Image (cartoon, rainbow, N blue to C red):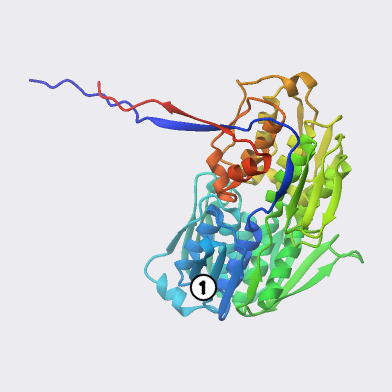
Amino acid sequence: MTQPAVKIEPAASTVTRVCVVPGGPVEGKIRPPGSKSLTNRALICAAFASGTSRLAGTLVSEDTEVMIDSLAKIGVSIKPVDGGRTLVVEGVGGVVSDDARKISSDAPVEMFIANSGTTVRFLTAALSAFGGKYKLSGVDRMHERPIGDLVDAIAPALDGWIVATSDGKCPPVDIDSNGWTGQPMRVGGGVSSQYLSGLMMAGPIASKPIRIEIVGEMVSIPYVRMTARLMKSFGGTCEWEFDGDEPWSGLRSVTVGGSYQGCEFDVEPDASAASYFWAAAAISGGSVLVEGLDENASQGDVGFARVLETMGCEFIVRDGGIEIKGGPLRGVDVEMGEISDTVQTLAVVALFADGPTRVRGVAHNRFKETDRIGNLAIELRKLGGRVDEHDDGLTIHPLSSDAQSSHRHDVVMETYNDHRMAMSFALLGLRIPGIEILNPACTRKTYPDFWADLESLTGRSHTWTTNRIGGARAS
């Protein structure tokens, strides 16, 4: 007898949403976790140093975990202390390594870097200078993020070969290297400062001075300065060349050298993460002190607090950090190329200002974890506001008073698996009830405890919902 066909329906899945509950002014203080940018830079320098390094205040997140896992595959010992907030790193030495080539002599060492831009860019440069065979791959979105400028900078100065295998010169990245030849390099400055930072940090690993010429205008200069300061702590050197007499306004080249030695390094709290809490004060008319950061911090994103000052907030320097007090907000016209990771935060603040806000100089934001111009505009328009896209940024028009006060239970904000989308949209709930945020767990990329920290600061619990979609059944 012929058996009837069995049809299996797709397995059930769940969708989680979070809704931040409005209330009064946000008052308090908070210390964000360690900087992702500093943690991953320090891990590169410590891993290829001679001797032992102790990194204090390090971030525990997906981005740092994939860096640690990848470095372990070439023999770097990284021991977590205090739940990973301190890392003890045994460096493998800053010279081209025969041992590394032996590790990958039969097949490339495969490294999964999820959607971590710092990890793929810094490792691409460092491993090509170190030597060996490697394959760096990630999630689908990572394979859409350009890395061609970095690969093209390395290839002419490489004893071996390197290629980005996806369309548009995106990862995966395949490397077969005997190290760098010492030839000068040229790298474009317009897409990401992480390309230059990666090459700079790899210079001491190559154990010979390397001159790197910058083609075009360099975006996010503060991150380049951060890299140089960190390298100096580990024994690296940088010599700069500028066009004209004004430093950094016309950066043309840097020559890197030295050799990395193990050291003790303190990681600052994450200034990009701090932006959400300063913004919470601005939006709610409250007052928030972010501890552990001041205007001399190595992270350029502390400048976000000054942008809030121009919008009408009060900027206060305390012994323990920087405090923002909210006030009536006005729209501004602001260049944000140097603090581009805070554009989404500012866009949400701008919705509650008394006039439009124009953001400039951030064309490269389209190539981040998601299109942080186009997709940001799509989501903010769901609130009933007007957002205009431009080649180099966007203009955000304030929401009407009706839009700010109405219950909009039908508004669901898509995060595009972008941690900064989720954390920025959380701020909407401080003023507008019923805003639901999809995939809140994506904040694990850089800030796993964000939702708990926001609850602690506001003194209010969020509303969480989990919906079951579909279900496995035979028919």
Residue 228: % across, % down: 73, 69
**Is disc 1 placed on a helix, strand or loop?**
loop
Quadrant housing residue 309:
top right
Is residue 62 at all visible to an observer of this figure? yes
Structural crowding at the residue carrying mark 1, measured as other residues with C-alpha within 10 Å and reported as few (<14), some (14–19) or many (≥20): many
Tell me how many marks there are: 1
Residue 341: % across, % down: 70, 48
Q: Is residue 185 above or below residue 435?
A: below
Residue 54: % across, % down: 58, 73
Residue 429: % across, % down: 67, 31
Give left or right: position of 181 versus 343: left
Give left or right: position of 20 versus 465: right
Name the foreground residue: 341 vs 5: 341
Name the foreground residue: 145 vs 303: 303
Q: Is residue 70 above or below residue 24?
A: below
Q: Would you name the residue on which mark 1 appears?
A: 131
Is residue 216 at all visible to an observer of this figure? no
Residue type at tag 1: Gly
Q: Is residue 309 above or below residue 439?
A: below
